Amino acid sequence: MNLNKLHQNFMESELPYKYSLVDVSNLLMTKYQAKEKDKEDFKDLNSDSFVNSRKIIFCFTIDEDKVLNSILSEEEKKEREYIKKQILNDLELSEEEKQQITIEENSINIIFESIDKKFISNFSIQGGSEQLLNELLVFKGINENDCVLGNEEYETFLIALFNTGYIN
């Protein structure tokens, strides 16, 4: 992968450096049939050292089977199936706990933080998908002044643009 070429293609594109929260929300609901959730549904994030719960602005869940099948790699699908089997065979969990965990395993949660309430400053994914991760990196974007080859964050952004098909 030629980063110089990706840099040039991005500079020549009319793509934004970052997407507004409104645009991201609309894109997620349209492209991924994501449903907005109340941040109170994610109280467990209060103990997550990578999340600033005071800055959480939006939470979404993707739980449509058709969408999940389209964004999960075969390896990610196998991993989810393995986890479900482990949960169902766990003798220490009640049937109710197993059912709740299985429901959670059939979705992907996305939590957005924002400092300025206009753009994404950070995000977390529960349930994981490499494709979705790349898309979210594109949505989060980068500051224009940081678009310099050699900047690891910018190079990661360029690779995400390439992996999602936004640039060639």
Image (cartoon, grey):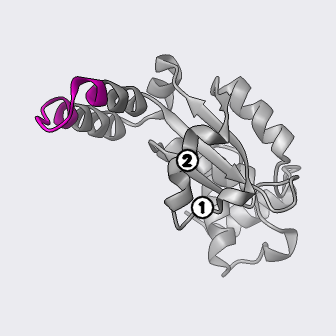
Tell me the magenta residue range.
85-98
Q: Residue 117: percent from the left, percent from the top?
A: 86, 53
Res. 11 in view: yes
Q: Disc 1 vs disc 2: which is toward the camera? A: 2
What is the CA distance from the residue labelled 1 to the residue labelled 2?
Answer: 11 Å
Residue at screen point 25% across, 38% down: 83
Label 2: element kind: helix
User: Which of the 4 quarters of the picture holds residue 159?
Assistant: bottom right
**Left or right for 144, reference 78:** right
Disc 2 residue type?
Lys
Left or right of 70 in this view: 86: left
- At label 1, the amino acid type is Val
Residue 38 higher or lower than 154, as above or below: above
- Determine which of the numbered discs, if any, sits on residue 86 in the image: none
Q: Where is mark 2, residue-wise? A: 43
| Residue 51, label in figure | 1
